[in-house]
Image: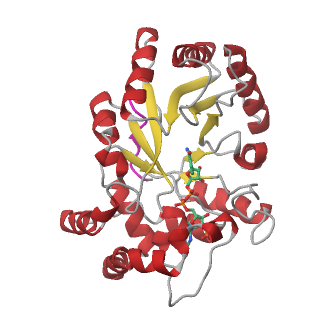
Amino acid sequence: MNNTVRLGKTSIEVAPLGIGTWAWGDSMFWSYGQDYDRNDVKNAFITAMEAGITLFDTAEVYGNGESERLIGQFKQENSQNITIATKYAPLPWRWNKQSVSQALTDSLNRLKVEYIPLYQVHWPFMLMSQETLMNALADEVEKGRIGAIGVSNYSAQEMKKASEILSPRNIPLAVNQVKYSLLTRKIETKGITHMANKLGITLLAYSPLAQGLLTGKYSHSQKQTPEGARKLDFRFNDKGLNKIAPVVNLLKDIAAKYDKTPAQVALNWLISQSNVIPIPGAKNARQAQENAGALGWQLTNGEVEQLEQISRPWLNN
Ligand SMILES: NC(=O)c1ccc[n+]([C@@H]2O[C@H](COP(=O)([O-])OP(=O)(O)OC[C@H]3O[C@@H](n4cnc5c(N)ncnc54)[C@H](OP(=O)(O)O)[C@@H]3O)[C@@H](O)[C@H]2O)c1
């Protein structure tokens, strides 16, 4: 059993690496139903659980609810305890507190549960005020329908404000879920890391493999092109791949020393930043197994430092 870490100042304990499930049921950005299917993601679910992963991240908007529906089905078929984190989408027409309660009811139904351990606000732009939203979420904690409140894509100041609104209700803001990897480090330069550490808010790192780039499988020599919307992402074209080659090469060198893979080293680097839990997406059992292999060992301080230095050009990305 891996060590566990707490989500912020809550009593919720999870393994120091989670799994992201955006690709489960999503054929808008990803290519669910084409190069992988329900059976693949079900095997990813089982494999991750068996490897000791406990935090499963989803959202009501992923696959228009299909990601939540699939997790609900898999959870019923496999009774082990997992910590589900889903997200509320602050859509423009959701402007009163009943919208929060209705969205949560729908997520609970799709997930086939009566309680969601972590409920996060997907992004900070909304018509509803933060006061209304945070208090509506606090009401749901008091009703026992959610265990903890999180936010996502919030700036340092937005995170602080949300935390201050919750404070009189004696509810800590548990997490801020942010884009973070060796190729996206702006949370460090925009004060988010600093503020999260100061307030005791855990950072959940999304896209921790830079959507597959840090696995090293997309390169000139491999000639593998990504599926889905990433075909339009300039980071995956020749010029983009050239630019990241020094980072990928260093990941490969370090990986070879430990008999690990570049993905495992990239995830281990994130785990070694204190207060960060990466949530890599996995579309099948092989990816889930490989990503879970980022746990149970540790890069040396020197290697952490080397990776920090080589990825400095991405400090503002
Ligand atoms: N809060 C937000 O706004 C937000 C935004 C984005 C994501 N998220 C969350 O964060 C999670 C992860 O982010 P992400 O999916 O964008 O990016 P990611 O975790 O960096 O990359 C996931 C993709 O990389 C490839 N991959 C993963 N593990 C691999 C392995 N071991 N070997 C080879 N390829 C591997 C797979 O795609 P291929 O096999 O097709 O290459 C997979 O779909 C999401 O599922 C979601 O839960 C949240």
Judge left or right: residue 30 versus residue 281. right
Is 85 or 123 nearer to us in this picture? 123
As rendered, which of 118 and 15 lies closer to the eye? 118
Residue lying at 73% horizontally and 25% vertically, measured from the top left: 93
* Image spot of residue 164 (x, y percent): 39, 17
Q: Is residue 104 above or below residue 244?
A: above
Quick check: 163 left or right of 310?
right
Q: Is residue 103 above or below residue 183?
A: above
Answer yes or no: is residue 9 visible. no
Q: Is residue 6 magenta?
A: yes
Residue at the top extreme of this rendering: 168
Residue 160 coordinates in the image, percent (x, y): 37, 25
Query: Where on the image, by quarter, is ligand 1?
Result: bottom right
Which stretch is magenta? 2-10
Task: Give the residue displayed 49% in from the left and 40% down from the top.
Answer: 153
* Furthest residue toward left: 302
Residue drawn 45% across and 30% down?
174
Q: In this rendered view, identify the residue nearer to me: 178 or 95.
A: 95
* Quadrant location of the C terminus in the rendered image: bottom left
Please state the horizontal and vertical placement of residue 30, each as a whole percent of the image. 69, 62
Quadrant of res 143: top right
Q: Residue at x 51, y 81 (%)?
A: 238
Residue 267 in percent (x, y) is at 41, 61
Main SS, magenta residues: loop
| Frontmost residue, 27 versus 57 | 27
Q: Is residue 5 magenta?
A: yes
Q: Is residue 40 above or below residue 123?
A: below
**In the rendered image, is residue 202 in sight?**
yes
